[in-house]
Amino acid sequence: MEARKDFHQRLDRLYEDVLRMGGELLQTLEKTRLCFLGLDHVLAGEIIAGDDRFDDQRRRLENEGLELLALQAPVAVDLRLIVVIMRIAQKFERMADLCEDIAVAVRNIPTDRIHSWMRDSIDEMARRAQRLVELALESFKERDAGKASELEAMDDPVDRLYRGFFKEFDRGREEELDVAIRVIMIARFFERIADHAVDIGENVRFLVEGT
């Protein structure tokens, strides 16, 4: 009996820790959006320096989850919850890595070489990606499969914005090639962040529905 009580206390801490990791990621996503919007090289340095924290959190959550699986042999909902927590921690770490990638790209863009249409389009992508991550975190916290199911449709506008970059370049714009490549990379990174949020939604449905 005492062992089961200890198990559930540890599982509750694991759950709270991954929620806290998600909250920190949302803050980093907002920093990343502002970093690009202002081509802020100082903020870019802060984002890059903070990435190790997410790596450490992911490793700790995975180790704790694996220990619970090995020692307690949980079943049903408890088993799914541990597996989903570890998967979500991986997704959060990958999104943080993408924020670092965006920050690195920003540091290599001269502050006077980016056009307003690029800035506006990527800012919209960033805002939409943030909202997807926020909703994914809410759906996990509330164990709401319906809310999780909304994520895929919300991702479509992000994909359209990303494809729109190539249409703009096809119209004969004359941006410098090195800047254009880095901006397209940044757009791709925000698009991938949105994709990871959709993946979290799929894991939430697995947690709630078991399928």
Image (cartoon, grey):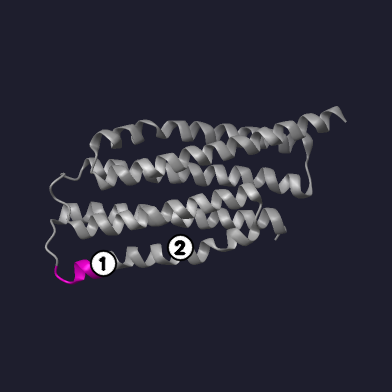
Tell me whether the residue at label 1 lies in contact with that at label 2, contact meaning CB atoms closer than 8 angstroms.
no
Question: Looking at the picture, which amino acid does disc 1 mark?
Answer: Phe
- Residue 148 counted in the magenta span: no
Please determine whether, in this image, residue 113 is positioned above or below residue 145.
Answer: above
Q: Residues within 10 Å of mark 1 (few under 14, many from 20)?
A: few
Q: Residue 131: which numbered mark, if any? A: none
Q: Nearer the viewer, residue 167 or 178?
A: 167
Q: Secondary structure at mark 2?
A: helix
The residue indicated by pointer 2 is 155
What residue is rendered at 46% in x and 45% in y?
Answer: 94
Is 210 positioned to the left or the right of 91 in the image?
right
Q: Which residues are magenta?
A: 167-172
What residue is rendered at 59% in x and 63% in y?
Answer: 149
Residue 34: image quadrant is: top left
Marks 1 and 2, the one that precedes in the sequence: 2
x and y, in percent, of residue 131 in the image: 46, 53
Q: Residues within 10 Å of mark 2 (few under 14, many from 20)?
A: many
Is 133 positioned to the left or the right of 63 in the image?
left
Q: Secondary structure at mark 1?
A: helix
Please determine whether, in this image, residue 198 is positioned above or below residue 82.
Answer: below
Residue 202: image quadrant is: bottom right
Q: CA distance from mark 1 to mark 2?
A: 18 Å
Is 138 positioned to the left or the right of 30 in the image?
right
The residue indicated by pointer 1 is 166
x and y, in percent, of residue 144 in the image: 65, 55
x and y, in percent, of residue 148 in the image: 59, 58
